[in-house]
Amino acid sequence: MYKKIFSYLGEYKKYAILTPLVMIGEVLMEILIPYVMAEMINVGIKGDGGTAFTVKAGLLMILMAVVSLCFGALGGMTAARAGMGFGKNLRGALFNKVQDYSFANVDKFSTASLVTRLTTDVTNVQNTLMMLIRMAIRSPFMLVGATIMAVKISPKLSTVFFIAIPLLALVLIFIMTNAHPRFTRMLKKYDAMNASVQENLIGIRVVKAFVRERHEKEKFQVSAEDVRSSQIMAEKLIILNGPAMQISMYACIVAILWFGGNMVINGSGMDTGDLSGFISYITQILSSLMALSFIFISLVISRASIGRIVEILDEDIDIKDKPESELTLEDGSIEFKNVDFSYSGNPDNLTLTNIDLKIKSGETVGIIGGTGSAKTSLVQLIPRLYDVLDGELIVGGHNVKDYCLDTLRGDVAMVLQKNVLFSGTIKDNLKWGNENATDEEIENACKNAQAHDFILSFPDGYETVLGQGGVNVSGGQKQRLCIARALLKNPKIIILDDSTSAVDTATDSKIREAFRRELADTTAIIIAQRISSVQDADRIIVLDDGKVVAFDSHEKLMESCEIYREVYESQVKGVEE
């Protein structure tokens, strides 16, 4: 798992390798400074070295401190470059993977959870990497070097920290064993809180319209409190590490001062300088142990994040692309051959059952059905946003599974039920349909979608900047812009999923007229709630509970399909009233 994650160092691997090497240089200087200090006290101050030796040793210590500082600063810089570069690569890999997901894969993870994994989880792992490459070599090297120097000064006095180390190891093992599940639960609480924030911000206009600010504040407070509680539960264990290390360090220093001081006073083979140097080495040893403990704890914290990241990277994409396929759509014909579909993949819980349809190229087909009749599910199979569970779906003469996805979706334009625009100008949004479209082509598409006039009513026309999600245009305007964007693809098949529900009947009629005039060779599939929006279609599919009840022209459906007739009469009666 760790190997997979850290493989994303990529081109920044050189900094990850250089950092530990630089840290070794810093450690060497830090280990030698107490030795020089001990010599300065023993020879220069207490011995016969005099002022000259003391000054020389002091200058050498200053030089070594400066060199150590330079190595430390360089190590910090290279570690930062490695860590930030790693974070960039990992986020890019996650984002790219999510872009390749099918709708079914996206449905498996909530949007809020994906956001948390790309931000909080990656940051946790990034910080752990930076700590690792700086401390994973530095601390053990410091520990070994300082231990050797301390034992060289006084093997007898060294037994003090040899007693402390096993005790600290037991504390660390206890923390590591119990912390991981707590941090896993904490990150799930983060997901829930982010979901609450995202839902509120997306629906902020509805919240204000229904005066539900207090309710949303209370709901967020509950989520925030859950995160706080889970953080405290996780941190309760982690904070034990610092005090345990500090107590051990000071206990060791007190013991060394006591026993070492007596050795100096009694002349038992230890000078004052040796005791000073020994204390410095003990401090280095215990500091190294503390740093190592923080490394292990960081690994425990990041382990939960790494697991969540690997889930995204290892997710098996259920729609397998065929990038090597050279098939192209010969026309806009569509044929469903005994198609079954289920979002869960469970054949006992079907959304669509035994769909058997044949749509000719260039035909205009309407789809009518009640809420939950699976109208959207049916059309989402055509550009292969989902895969059929059973049966075959033939588009343009070939099974949809035999196409390269880019080819298939490039010739199928779909205006989704939920219209989405992005930050940027109107023209930028329209060019999603064709990035090479000329101004003339853009204007023509907008005229056919009945969007040209309202665009020109804005002071900046096509250069008008849209807010996030197109918040500064109305629902009907947003729908017409999305239709224009789809028309710019010049597709063989265009699917409108209830895409004129927010426009008036006159504008709806003009859009349908433009379709008949401009898209004579394009297969058009129109989902609508109003029969008036599809009654002039060549044929109309009537869906009920995931099954095709009827498929014929308006006139024949009025004669033969009771469901269709009832819907029509209820709508006509409603209009008359």
Image: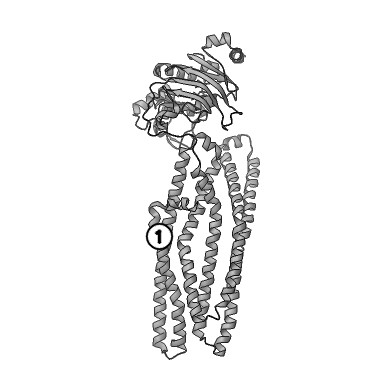
Q: Amino acid at mark 1?
A: Ile
Label 1: few (<14), some (14–19) or many (≥20) C-alpha neighbours in 10 Å = some
| Front one among 321 and 226 | 321
**394 sits left or right of 175 in the view:** left
* Total numbered circles: 1
Query: Is residue 415 shown above or below 233?
Result: above
Q: Is 284 placed left or right of 53 in the picture?
A: right
The residue beneath circle 1 is 17
The residue positioned 61% from the left and 65% from the top of the image is 170
Q: Give the percent coordinates (x, y) of residue 432.
A: 41, 32
Please say which color scheme the image uses: one colour
- Can I make out residue 575 in this image? yes
Rendering coords of residue 334 (x, y %): 45, 21
Q: Quadrant of residue 163?
A: bottom right
Image vertical order of residue 201 relative to residue 336, above or below: below
- Whether residue 501 is visible, yes or no, is no
Q: Is residue 439 above or below residue 194?
A: above
> Residue at the bottom extreme?
48
Residue plotted at (39% across, 71% down): 67
Q: Position of residue 401 (x, y in %)?
A: 45, 29
In the shown orientation, is residue 360 left or right of residue 554?
left
Which quadrant would the C terminus be assigned to in this image? top right
- Which residue is located at x 50 percent, y 70 percent? 143
| Camera-side residue of 525 and 465 | 525
Percent from the top left, x then y, of residue 448? Answer: 42, 21
SS of the residue at dot 1? helix
Return the residue nearer the eye: 146 or 56: 146
